Each structure stands twice: as C-alpha cells, then as structure tokens.
C-alpha cells in the first residue's frame, strides 16, 4: 500500500498521514521533516532528495506533503491512492492557529528537528494566499485529471471522518 497525502497547509495532511500509518502499520514520511533542517533552514536539496528516494524503496509507505521537488512524479505514479485535502483557506488558517497554541515552542513529530512551532506573518500569508496560487490550484487539478481513478478529494473534516470510516481495518 502506498498513499500520497497532499493539500493545503493547515488542512491536516500530517494528522491524516499519521492516522493512516498507525491504522495500517505502514511507515510515514512527512516531507516537512525532509525539507526543514534545524532552525527552520532548508536542508541541502541533494540530501533531501536522497532521503525521499531512500524512503520510497519501502514496499509500503505513506507520504505527507506537496513538495514537487522530492520524487513528485514517481510518488504520484507509485501511489495506490492520492488523498487531496482541499479545505477552505479560513478553515486551514483556524486549524493552523489551533496547532500553534497546542505546540507553541515545541517541535511536532512531523516537523524537522529543531523547528519549533511558529506562526509568523510569512506563514500566515502562505496559508491564506501564497500557498493557494493559481499555479498550486493547477497542480492539484492536474493530479486529479491525470490520476482520477486513485484520487480522493476531501474538503472538510466530515469528509475525512467518512473516508476513514470507509477504509478496511
């Protein structure tokens, strides 16, 4: 089983990936852990690519994140299921704020080591505008058009709950 979980920041990609990993006993890779090195610095691209490539050698995997620079085409081609979390921007913003207050000053397990939870102006702009550009929406649309038989689009928490309820244990 191979599942790619993609979507907007704050929609719950990491939480869903972790839940699926626990349910099926499958290793999970959070691309934020690959991309971010301590102190919120971007990891060397070659090293990040190597980490993603090595992880994908697993027979089964769940990968959380959009990052097109990390094995993007291979990930989508190999995935048995692609889950797109396309929540409204204000819902994502509210969820990110909730996460910030829950983890403030701590590093989440799905984030790069040495990257404590933060909510700054740059990240707020990313959630509300920069992460929702015409290009990003086009990328998601292309995924849906190219892989319609294996894409599931979830637009709200109820959709996630129904999706999880409908999965075999």
Image (cartoon, rainbow, N blue to C red):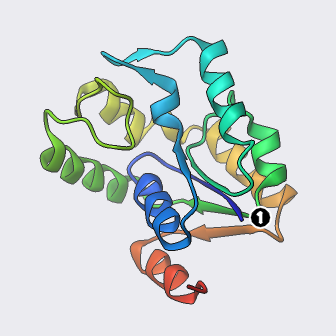
Answer few, some or many: residues within 10 Å of disc 1's Cα (few below 14, many 20 plus, some between 14 and 19).
Answer: some
Left or right: where 98 falls relative to 127: left
Q: Is residue 126 left or right of residue 5?
A: left
Q: Residue 142: tell me if it is visible.
A: no
User: Is 109 rendered above or below residue 107?
Assistant: below
Give the side of residue 99 with respect to residue 75, left or right: left
Q: The C terminus is located in which quarter?
A: bottom right
Q: Which residue is mark 1?
A: 80
x%, y% of residue 9? 43, 45
Question: What element does badge 1 sit on?
Answer: loop
Is residue 50 placed above or below 108 in the rendered structure?
A: above
Residue 89 picture location, percent across and down: 40, 52
| Residue 107 image-quadrant placement | top left
Q: Is residue 163 above or below residue 43?
A: below
In the image, 148 versus 44, the foreground residue is: 44
Q: Residue at x 44, y 66 (%)?
A: 19
How far from the left and from the top, in percent, is residue 39?
Answer: 30, 15
């Amino acid at each position: 089983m191979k599942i790619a979980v993609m979507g907007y920041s704050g929609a719950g990609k990491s939480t869903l990936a972790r839940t699926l990993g626990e349910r099926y006993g499958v290793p999970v890779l959070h691309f934020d852990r690959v991309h971010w090195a301590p102190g919120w610095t971007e990891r060397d691209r070659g090293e990040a690519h190597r980490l993603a490539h090595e992880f994908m050698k697993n027979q089964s995997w769940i990968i959380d994140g959009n990052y097109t620079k990390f094995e993007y085409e291979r990930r989508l081609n190999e995935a048995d299921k692609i889950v797109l979390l396309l929540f409204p921007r204000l819902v994502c913003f509210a969820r990110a704020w909730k996460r910030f207050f829950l983890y403030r000053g701590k590093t989440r397990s799905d984030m790069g080591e040495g990257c404590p939870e933060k909510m700054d102006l740059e990240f707020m702009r990313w959630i509300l505008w920069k992460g929702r550009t015409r290009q990003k929406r086009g990328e998601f649309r292309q995924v849906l058009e190219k892989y319609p038989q294996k894409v599931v689009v979830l637009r709200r928490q109820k959709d996630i709950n129904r999706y999880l309820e409908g999965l075999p244990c």
